[in-house]
Amino acid sequence: MSLNNFTRNRKLSFRSAIVFIINFLTKSLSVEIDNFIRFIGCNLKGSEISCFTKSAFVQYRKKIKPEVFKSLSDSLIEEFYTDNDESVKLWNGFRLLAVDGSRLVLPDTNELESIYGKAKNQSETGVVQARISVLYDVLNRFAIDGVLSPLSTGENVLALNHLAFAKANDLIIYDRGYPSFNLIYEHFEKGVDFLIRVKADFSNVTREFHQRGLQSDVVRMQPGKNIKLSDKPYSKNTFKEVRLVRVELPSRNVLR
């Protein structure tokens, strides 16, 4: 957080603090610190690790910018996909990606509330929540991009931002909460393939497709009549050709 942080010869260096944090801490800090010191001492000869307290670690942690973990993740992902064709799992030649989002309950502080917002639960009690969205490689099990945003930011906006991390020969899968002409349009502009689950009554085109009992058909999708277009790079007459595929689900069976 400051150029003066980690400049003195302390018991816990910047490097060691980072290694400790990314070790997926699940137990109490006292137990984790003891295990960490014993493991490092047994496996890394000459390590600078020495005993440190919980209080010291909490102080060290406050000196580390959160962005360092995103940077490390990006470096790891880039390394995995570079000159590593034999290990990268594909589906029919596609890198199979999926986008999904959710809400995350955060500590109830004024600072976090001012950034992310507050929502009421079933008991009408206000809780601080943020919206999370992830672009995930489902076969190689990597989170390509993850975002923590205010509740006021819609899932579709976050999904569009994920497109910056997609490339040719990617196939991105979306659930039925995401379909929109804008999302379809941006995929065409980016040159990225997509598969979106839609309800039968999503639009007049999908409704007609469903009523005709077709299994597959190439149709023209256009912006909805009530969609604001003043800030869009297309008009009401713009269309994109997509293939609709009918998938019959077992009667009364809910996907889980």
Image (tube, helix red, strand yellow):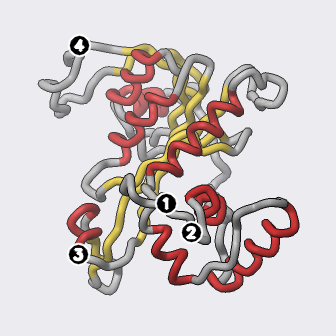
Return the residue at label 4: 237
Residue 156 image position (x, y, % from top left): 36, 41
Compute the Cα span from label 1 to label 3. 29 Å
Which numbered disc, 4 or 2, marks the residue closer to the eye? 2
Of callouts 4 and 1, the N-terminal one: 1
Give me the residue at 42% from left, 39% from top. Answer: 159
Tell me, yes or no, if residue 186 can be seen here.
yes
Q: Is residue 246 left or right of residue 8?
A: right
What label does residue 6 carry, if any?
1
Under tag 4, what secondary structure? loop
Which numbered disc, 4 or 1, marks the residue closer to the eye? 1
Which numbered disc, 2 or 3, marks the residue closer to the eye? 2
Under tag 2, what secondary structure? loop
Please say if 121 is above or below 234: below
Query: What crowding class fits label 4: few (fewer than 14 Cα within 10 Å), some (14-19), or many (20 or more)?
Result: few
Query: What crowding class fits label 2: few (fewer than 14 Cα within 10 Å), some (14-19), or many (20 or more)?
Result: some
Give me the residue at 37% from left, 76% from top. Answer: 107
Compute the Cα span from label 1 to label 2. 8 Å
Compute the Cα span from label 4 to label 3. 47 Å
Tag 1–tag 2 contact (CB < 8 Å):
yes
What label does residue 10 carry, if any?
2
Quadrant of res 39: bottom right
Give me the residue at 81% from left, 69% from top. Answer: 41
Return the residue at label 3: 110
Please say if 62 is above or below 222: below
